[in-house]
Image (cartoon, rainbow, N blue to C red):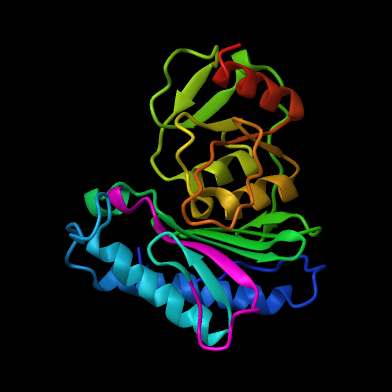
Amino acid sequence: MNLSEPVRCGPVRVVLPGAEAVIATFERAAGAVAEVLVGTTDWGASGLRIGQYAVDLAADQACLDVLYDAGYRVLSEESGVTGPPGSDDAPIVVVDPLDGSTNASRGVPWYATALCLVDGDGPAVAMVHNHAIRDTFVAVRGGGAERNGAAIRPSATTDLDRALLGVSGLPERHYGWAQFRAMGASAPDICMVACGVTDAWCDMGAHHGVWDYLASVLIVTEAGGVAGEVHGRELCVLDHTARRGPVVAATPELLAAVLARRAGR
């Protein structure tokens, strides 16, 4: 598979002024990360913090270069909140340059770049590009969501005992699901709910940063799904230190059931 090919998301129904330019910038950022992945030979640890790889830093710099050039501030997993000179009032892009870097380092084909523009009304434009399988999800607030240029919808599953549930972390007990999957990268994991591959997804540890889920949550909700947080907290929080427990589902009934089981009820 040629990861160096340009990232293209296909046509998107744009109802937000400026969204086309944002999407084009996101394509360039994901493409820059793809170039990093093609040239990476060092899959070892960065030595700066536990769980960070050298490739995470290279991917981060590739994203920052593109996003700074477009005039955005950035909230990144790897570098916190930064921006080019004079960008104090600029819109902010929440980015996980390489979600699933352990998967990438071990050859597990499930890792992505996730980007979400946040404006005064909240999440506005999102892209998740799965580099391993060249799968691109895009959503624009009020305009729906697409996968590789085709409109997507979640499943119609309402009952937990019929659901295929994605998880992050180790479940403490069986929630009553039909089956579950743990694939190791939250951004593409959550997108699977948006397109009906899985029926719901649950963070078992309430340990995710906003970069892990914000783009995918917009994609799910624009596709017609629903989202919540295990403790009822706001998911769109522009704080690098904040951690949340996102839960997404195809239907409100299924979301309520997963949240209840997650709370021990």
Vertically, is 236 above or below 155?
Answer: below
Q: Position of residue 169 (x, y in %)?
A: 40, 31
In the image, the segment drawn in magenta is 82-102
Instruction: Verify whether residue 85 appears in magenta.
Output: yes
Q: Position of residue 246 (x, y in %)?
A: 57, 38
Q: Position of residue 261 (x, y in %)?
A: 58, 16
- How many numbered callouts? 0
Residue 194 seen: yes
- Relative to 4, 238 lies left or right: right
Pick whichever, 69 or 147, lies toward us: 69
> Who's the residue at 70% across and 76% down the image?
20
Quadrant (top left/top right/bottom left/bottom right) for the C terminus? top right
> Who's the residue at 55% across and 25% down the image?
164
> Who's the residue at 24% across and 50% down the image?
50
- Relative to 170, 135 lies left or right: right
Pick whichever, 220 or 148, lies toward us: 220
The quarter of the picture where residue 49 lies is bottom left
Instruction: Verify whether residue 194 appears in magenta.
Output: no
Vertically, is 93 above or below 170?
Answer: below
The quarter of the picture where residue 231 lies is top right
